[in-house]
């Protein structure tokens, strides 16, 4: 889990009488659930090396786990001038903070080479880059705390429970998720398969 929220960050009215160990376990579950829902890792990583699939037609690729702070090297597994498949450094590229890496060959100020400038094979881009959040955004922390509180009060995500004459109702909706998707919508990545 990379979202670190401690029991001391949970307001006492949400903790109730729960022990810190129980709160920590609920926070751990909630942090993992948030990362799974958002399809991303929120941690800050410097000089992370990844292999990514290029989009040859658009001459671009999507780097995982934005925001991207910097890209230091981009290498492609392509044929060299001798026809051998090797890792070759690319020089004509740019990136955006949301993780788009693209080929700039043919744009003003770049040289056009005789060999292809962008790879086409799966996992044929090797990128060294710095990405993630230095500080996890407050809405993400709020969603983790809220999900942990929901889990501690209703671990089975029940809508209604009746025991004898006592009737407990947690929600009017059936199947309401424990995660606050409104808080997390901005941070959710959606994976599109080719």
Image: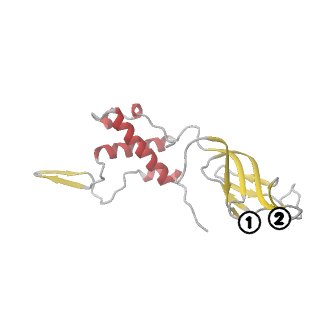
Q: Is residue 99 left or right of residue 190?
A: right
**Alpha carbon distance from label 2 to label 1:** 9 Å
In the rendered image, the residue lying farthest to the front is: 84
Q: Is residue 112 above or below residue 182?
A: below
Depth order, front residue of 85/15: 85
Depth order, front residue of 86/168: 86
Structure colour scheme: secondary structure
Residue 90 is situated, as x and y percent measured from the top left of the image, at: 80, 54
Residue 194 is situated, as x and y percent measured from the top left of the image, at: 61, 68
Q: Are marks 2 and 1 in contact (CB under 8 Å)?
A: yes
Mark 1 Cα shell of 10 Å, populated few (<14), some (14-19), many (≥20)? some
Residue 74 is situated, as x and y percent measured from the top left of the image, at: 75, 52
Give the SS element for disc 1: loop
In the rendered image, the residue lying farthest to the top is: 8
Q: Is residue 104 left or right of residue 30?
A: right
Mark 2 Cα shell of 10 Å, populated few (<14), some (14-19), many (≥20)? few
x 43%, y 34%: residue: 6
Q: Is residue 164 left or right of residue 123?
A: left
**Residue 121 visible to an observer of this rendering:** yes
Give the SS element for disc 2: loop
The label number, if any, that marks residue 94 in the structure image: none
x 28%, y 44%: residue: 153
Depth order, front residue of 115/93: 115
x 66%, y 49%: residue: 97
The label number, if any, that marks residue 120 in the structure image: 1
Q: Which of the 4 quarters of the picture holds residue 31?
A: top left
x 59%, y 38%: residue: 134
Q: Which residue is mark 2?
A: 116
Residue 130 is situated, as x and y percent measured from the top left of the image, at: 67, 43
Q: Is residue 176 left or right of residue 81?
A: left
């Amino acid at each position: 889990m990379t979202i670190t929220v401690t029991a001391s960050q949970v307001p006492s009215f949400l903790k109730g009488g729960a022990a810190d160990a129980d709160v920590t376990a609920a926070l751990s579950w909630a942090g993992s659930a948030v990362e799974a829902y958002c399809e991303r890792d929120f941690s800050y990583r410097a000089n992370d090396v990844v292999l990514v699939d290029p989009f040859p037609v658009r001459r671009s690729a999507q780097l995982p786990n934005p925001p991207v702070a910097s890209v230091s090297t981009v290498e492609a597994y392509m044929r060299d001038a001798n026809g051998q498949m090797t890792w070759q450094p690319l020089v004509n590229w740019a990136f955006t903070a949301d993780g788009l890496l693209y080929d700039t060959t043919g744009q003003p100020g770049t040289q056009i080479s005789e060999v292809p400038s962008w790879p086409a094979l799966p996992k044929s881009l090797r990128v060294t880059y710095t990405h993630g959040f230095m500080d996890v955004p407050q809405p993400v922390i709020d969603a983790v705390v809220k999900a942990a509180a929901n889990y501690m009060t209703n671990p089975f995500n029940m809508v209604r429970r009746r025991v004898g004459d006592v009737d407990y109702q947690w929600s009017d909706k059936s199947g309401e998720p424990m995660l606050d998707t409104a808080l997390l919508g901005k941070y959710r990545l959606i994976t599109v398969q080719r």
